[in-house]
Amino acid sequence: MAFKFEKLKVWQKALDLADEIDNMTKAFPKEEVYVLTSQAKRAADSISMNIAEGSTGQSNPEFKRFLGYALRSDIEVVNCLHLAIRRKYIKEEIFQKHYKSCGEILVMISALIKSLN
């Protein structure tokens, strides 16, 4: 049995981003484990979770509300990336890779919201 959200490319891309952020944060210093590491991972996980939760058995307005949460979580990941590069936990190429993914997810979520109007 397939759930509606499993067919959404944006959900699949959000899962990929969550895995990438999880791998990225493994190299962060130990003192960040309960701060930036945790925040970045929770924000990245929240994108796909909100897409999934909002898509199943919800009205379009309710789905849009959850997509708004997913969008804000995506932007939160971007802020975590900025903090990580400023603190020299990641290199520019890693920042750019994940920044690009966040931008693509933002566009996809925005398009999905628009399609529900």
Image (cartoon, grey):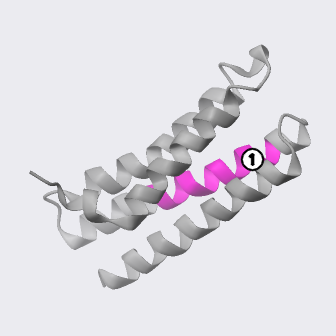
Instruction: Look at the image and tell me in which quarter the C terminus lies.
Output: bottom left
Q: Amino acid at mark 1?
A: Leu
Would residue 57 be found to the left or right of residue 11 on screen?
Answer: left
Q: Magenta region: which residues?
A: 69-83
For image coordinates 44% across by 80% down, the residue present is 111
Image position, residue 70 (x, y; %): 45, 56
Residue that numbered label 1 is attached to: 81
Image position, residue 13 (x, y; %): 47, 58
Q: Residues within 10 Å of mark 1 (few under 14, many from 20)?
A: many
Instruction: Count the numbered circles shown.
Output: 1
Name the quadrant containing residue 98: bottom right
* Foreground of the two, 1 or 43: 1
Name the quadrant containing residue 67: bottom left
* Foreground of the two, 53 or 24: 24
Q: Is residue 48 magenta?
A: no
For image coordinates 74% across by 47% down, the residue present is 81
Q: Is residue 82 magenta?
A: yes
Name the quadrant containing residue 32: top right
Q: Residue furthest top?
A: 30
Q: Secondary structure at mark 1?
A: helix
Magenta residues, dominant SS class? helix
Q: Residue furthest left?
A: 1
Would residue 45 be found to the left or right of residue 95 on screen?
Answer: left
Image position, residue 114 (x, y; %): 39, 83
> Is 37 rendered above or below residue 106?
above
For image coordinates 33% across by 84% down, the residue present is 115
> Is 7 rendered above or below residue 43?
below
Would residue 26 be found to the left or right of residue 64 on screen?
Answer: right
For image coordinates 29% across by 52% down, the residue present is 52
Image position, residue 64 (x, y; %): 33, 68
